[in-house]
Amino acid sequence: MSTPPPLPSASDWDVPSTRIAALVLAAGNAAFWIYIFPFVYAHANPEGDGFDLLPVMPFTAIFLALTLPTAARAIGMRGYGVALALMLGATTLNAIIFLALLSSYAAADR
């Protein structure tokens, strides 16, 4: 009795380069998430009531909802295409929110 042929990969995206790209984006988003805390704190009003630190919340939600599960998915070696798509979405959301934050800081400095 002969052995059956090997099963094809689940997706064309399940290649090591997709995994590496997802992990690099996850590391970049994690570093950005860590960077955003001192950045927002440096622009906060020292005599304020603490609401100046509220812009950190969307970045934390993006990190916990998109970046962390996606990094676990890429490390667990499954669903690289989904992981890469989610990481690109997280990176885009971080960029949009950060640019809005920068424009609000620039408007406040006028």
Image (spheres, rainbow, N blue to C red):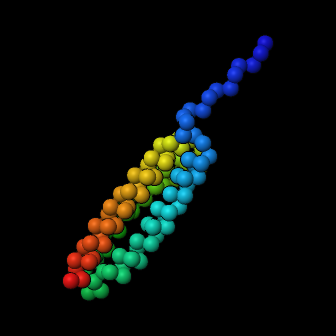
Q: Quadrant of the C terminus?
A: bottom left
Left or right placement of residue 58 versus residue 8 in this view: left
99 to 67, vertically: above or below: below
Picture coordinates of residue 64 (x, y %)? 43, 57
Rendering coords of residue 6 (x, y %): 68, 26
Residue sitting at the far right: 1
Q: Quadrant of residue 100?
A: bottom left
- Residue shown at 39% from the left, 77% from the top: 39
Residue 70, horizontal then vertical, whole percent: 49, 50
Q: Is residue 87 left or right of residue 10?
A: left
Q: Is residue 65 visible?
A: no
User: Residue at horizontal 34%, vertical 67%?
Assistant: 98
Residue farthest bottom in this picture: 47
Label count reads 0
Q: Is residue 15 above or below residue 5?
A: below
Residue 46 at what x, y percent from top left? 30, 86
- Observer able to see residue 97: yes
In the image, 102 versus 35, the foreground residue is: 102
User: Is 19 left or right of 107, judged from the image as shown?
Assistant: right
- Quadrant location of residue 57? bottom left
Q: Quadrant of the N terminus?
A: top right
- Residue at screen point 54% across, 40% down: 13
Q: Residue visible at 37% across and 61% down?
A: 94
Q: Is residue 94 above or below residue 14?
A: below
